[in-house]
Image (spheres, grey):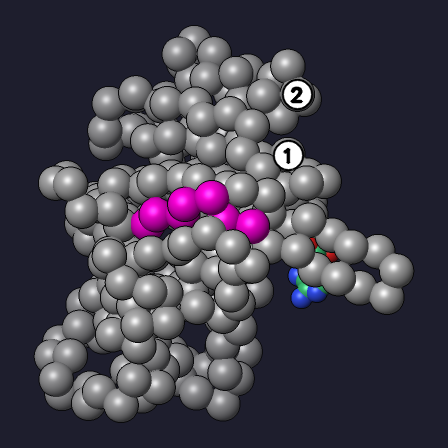
Amino acid sequence: MGSVSGIKLDSVSRVFKGRGATVQALQQVSLDCPAGSFTALIGPSGCGKSTMLRLALGLDTADSGVVSISGMTPGDAAKAGITGVAFQDAALMPWRTVEDNIALPLDVLGRSRGEAGGKIAELIKLVGLSGFEKALPGELSGGMRQRVAIARSLVTNPQVLFLDEPFGALDQILRRQMNIELQRIWIASRATTLLVTHGIDEAVFLADRVVVMQSRPGRISRIIDVDLPRPRKPDIFTSPEFHALEDAVAEALDGH
Ligand SMILES: Nc1ncnc2c1ncn2[C@@H]1O[C@H](COP(=O)(O)OP(=O)(O)O)[C@@H](O)[C@H]1O
Ligand SMILES: [Mg+2]
């Protein structure tokens, strides 16, 4: 784990001024995700989760406070390919094949696919899409498209991975399968991961820590440690320890 922080937010604030309304999307948010950790971020709609990710990806700038990624500015980290990201809608390019979609971040960074070695083939295998290398997104199921998005987020070997509700559009059964796969992928890659989710079960199953946020103003209200041993198996979903942690997160979300 070491002392280098994968993701560090120090008293970060972000205000959006609209025509009349002013929204305090984040108010003095501090969060330290050690290298190699898995953090889940949960909270009501509009509490600033995506804003936090956008700041960490260098897509937006804080009004005050500091965001650092592996000790770098978010913009530098993104340019160096240190960060990877997958959003809720897989956002694949419909005319690109599975392997060409996965290779997209390499093209954007101006890296050759040869340089990445067998990375693309390795990722296709990792996410269970062998045989679909030449398929187009329109030929895939929703779950398969999300797996392409996850593979794409990993193609630069990111040290830091941001996942914004990546399985939000999937049905419960598929979501469970993806949770189990994501744990396997994370154990293999050990990227510092920040997962935004609406699923309490998903958060507890995957994370070392569940960060609970509240809205208006967007802020962190509670951090719940999840000390369940890994790898976590599907039967853990029905264990008493699991239920107790789910209850703790639910209570924190309710503001207790
Ligand atoms: N670019 C923007 N311009 C104006 N308001 C924004 C913008 N981005 C986010 N907001 C507002 O900031 C708040 C937090 O949004 P967001 O981070 O998307 O929440 P979450 O991802 O937790 O649902 C919301 O009230 C949203 O309307
Ligand atoms: Mg969001």
Residue position marked by numbered label 2 in the rendering:
255
Image coords of residue 60 (percent x, y): 53, 67
Instruction: Give the quarter of the image for residue 216.
Output: top right
The alpha-carbon separation of the residues under discs 2 and 1 comes to 8 Å
Asked if marks 2 and 1 touch (Cβ < 8 Å), the reply is yes
Give the residue displayed 15% in from the left and 41% down from the top. Answer: 3
The spot of residue 252 in percent (x, y) is: 58, 21
In front here: 66 or 128? 66
Can you tell which mark lies on residue 164?
none
- Identity of the residue drawn at 35% across and 86% down: 108
**Is residue 181 in sight in this rendering?**
no
140 in relation to 114, above or below: above
Write down the region rendered in magenta.
Answer: 7-13
Q: Position of residue 201 (x, y in %)?
A: 50, 30
Judging by the rendered image, the residue that carries numbered circle 1 is 214
Secondary structure beneath dot 1 equals: strand
Compared with residue 43, is residue 195 higher up or lower down, i.e. above or below?
below
- First-in-chain label (2 vs 1): 1
Residue 72 shows in this picture: yes
